[in-house]
Image (cartoon, rainbow, N blue to C red):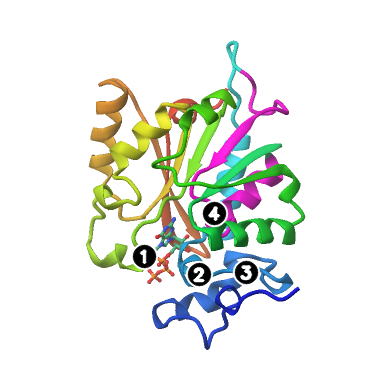
């Protein structure tokens, strides 16, 4: 099967600002040579594999007890809201039986499904082309979604231009509104955010949305010894595992 050139980029055809990611290709997808597809945007936005593995293992290690399902129940359902090229979806699908991968961009979703199949994992994943802002949240409430994972667009590599990243510039919604939309479905929310995200903003928003005493948990994550992003957790993930 042949795929469009825009999804089979090479060092030569990558945009100037994305060329530096070419040498990171095996840290993005260890199976890169087995036919991974990415468009220009995905080259700089897919979570490096080591971090995606860490996040998925971390979520897997949690138990929700006291009358709730355990995370190991077969019907545990997790959504990857902005699935992009599938870096996170793949690692979640390795560890959870029901993964819903959502993206509003048709090329991203195509790459995600294709890349999941490269890893032999697309059977565990329901792929949905949908825009999170307008999607019918009731569907996910009815599906009893247990956890939401999201690595939203940070607005491209320019996120590093300011010392502190203002989370009002997250796309498609500022952090507060994004979290409000997630909390309609579940409080068990995990985000992958820029490493220079404004931590005091996260703290203020957490208290505004969940109450003065509420907490979230933040872990800085690196790949090959280099800091790449911030893993921010709410709900059951903000407390210690049992
Ligand atoms: P980076 O900071 O652009 O690269 O992206 P690098 O090599 O750390 O930059 P350097 O100049 O500091 O050396 C690092 C990682 O951040 C990427 O691999 C993605 O996982 C993530 N990332 C970067 N961007 C611009 C985005 C984005 O817009 N959305 C999401 N979800 N992740 C991103």
Q: Is residue 75 left or right of residue 184?
A: right
Q: Which residue is mark 4?
A: 51
| Label located before the other in sequence (3 or 4) | 3
Residue 21 position within the rendered picture, expressed as x and y whole percent measured from the top left:
49, 74
Marks 4 and 3: in contact by CB < 8 Å? no
* Circle nearer the viewer, 4 or 2: 2
- Mark 1 within 8 Å of ligand 1, using the beta carbon: yes
Vertical position of residue 236 compared to residue 154: above or below: above
For discs 3 and 4, the disc positioned in front in the rendered view: 3
Tag shown at residue 213? none
Q: Alpha-carbon distance for marks 3 and 4?
A: 19 Å
Q: Is mark 4 within 8 Å of ligand 1?
A: yes
Front residue of 91/184: it is 184
Residue topped by disc 3: 37
Residue extent of the magenta highlight: 69-95
Q: Quick one: label 4 or label 2, which is nearer the N terminus?
A: 2
Q: Which residue in the structure is indicated by mark 2?
A: 43
């Amino acid at each position: 099967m042949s795929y469009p050139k825009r999804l089979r980029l090479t060092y030569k055809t990558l945009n100037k600002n994305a060329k530096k990611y070419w040498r990171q290709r095996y840290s993005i997808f260890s199976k890169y040579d087995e036919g991974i597809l990415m468009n220009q945007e995905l080259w700089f936005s897919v979570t490096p594999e080591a971090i995606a593995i860490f996040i998925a293992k971390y979520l897997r290690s949690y138990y929700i007890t006291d009358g709730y399902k355990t995370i190991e129940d077969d019907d545990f359902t997790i959504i990857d809201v902005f699935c992009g090229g599938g870096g996170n979806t793949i690692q979640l699908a390795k560890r959870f039986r029901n993964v819903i991968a959502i993206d509003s961009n048709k090329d991203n979703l195509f790459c995600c499904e294709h890349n999941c199949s490269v890893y032999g994992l697309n059977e565990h994943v329901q792929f949905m082309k949908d825009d999170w802002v307008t999607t019918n949240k009731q569907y996910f409430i009815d599906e009893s979604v247990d956890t939401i994972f999201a690595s939203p667009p940070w607005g491209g590599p320019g996120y590093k231009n300011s010392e502190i990243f203002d989370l009002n510039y997250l796309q498609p919604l500022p952090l507060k509104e994004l979290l409000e939309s997630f909390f309609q479905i579940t409080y068990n929310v995990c985000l992958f955010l820029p490493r220079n995200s404004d931590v005091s903003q996260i703290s203020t928003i957490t208290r505004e949305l969940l109450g003065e005493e509420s907490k979230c948990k933040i872990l800085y994550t690196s790949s090959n010894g280099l800091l790449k992003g911030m893993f921010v957790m709410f709900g059951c993930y903000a407390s210690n595992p049992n």
